[in-house]
Every structure is written in C-alpha cells, then in structure tokens.
Amino acid sequence: MNTVAEIITWTLVAAQLPDDEQAVMINTVEWHEPVWIGYYEAGCWHLIDGTALADDVVIAWADLPAGIEGE
C-alpha cells in the first residue's frame, strides 16, 4: 500500500485573505468542529453552502488538499 501525505499550511486571517470565492478550509474558534470548508466573498466569510458567518469566527484558512489523481 502506498501512502501519500500533504502538508497543510494555515494562514492567519489577520495576515492575508484568500481570493474571493476560492473554496478553502477555514479554522473557527467557536464551534465544536474547528475545521470547515468555506470561502471569502465581498468582505464576508461563508460556509460552502452559502451560510454567512460572523466576522470574528474564522481565525485562519488553508488551501484545500490537492488529493490524489486517478491511476
């Protein structure tokens, strides 16, 4: 069995934001599950389903893993 690993690099929201509408992993401080998939658009964070989030909920974001292409 082959094992593939990817390094995830988190970026603090205070330091940099992702491109608008780019799906990313988001790290939150208030929720039971700290990592979600979401995006930033027009000055607001959203979950991938479009639900808007409060301004201070997201503290960091990371690019989605590339995954493995079919063999």
Image (cartoon, grey):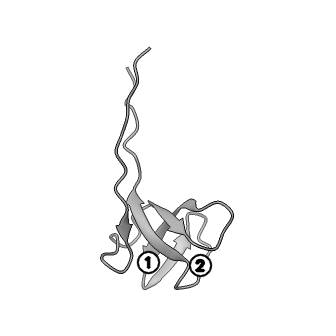
Name the amino acid, label 1.
Glu
Q: Which of the 4 quarters of the picture holds residue 60? A: bottom left
Residue at 34% across / 75% down in the picture?
17
Tell me residue 38's x, y (percent): 51, 65
Tell me residue 69's x, y (percent): 37, 30
Q: Residue furthest top?
A: 1
Tell me residue 8's x, y (percent): 37, 50
Mark 2 vs 1, N-terminal side: 1
What's the CA distance linking mark 2 and mark 1? Answer: 10 Å
Q: Which of the 4 quarters of the picture holds residue 4? A: top left
Q: Quadrant of the N terminus?
A: top left
The image's mark for residue 52 is: 2
Residue at 47% across / 74% down in the picture?
59
User: Which residue is the site of mark 1?
Assistant: 41
**Which is nearer the eye, 63 or 39?**
63
Report crowding for label 1: few under 14, some 14 to 19, many 20 or more residues within 10 A (C-alpha): some
Residue 10 vs 58, above or below: the answer is above
**Which is nearer the eye, 21 or 3?**
3
Name the amino acid, label 2.
Ala
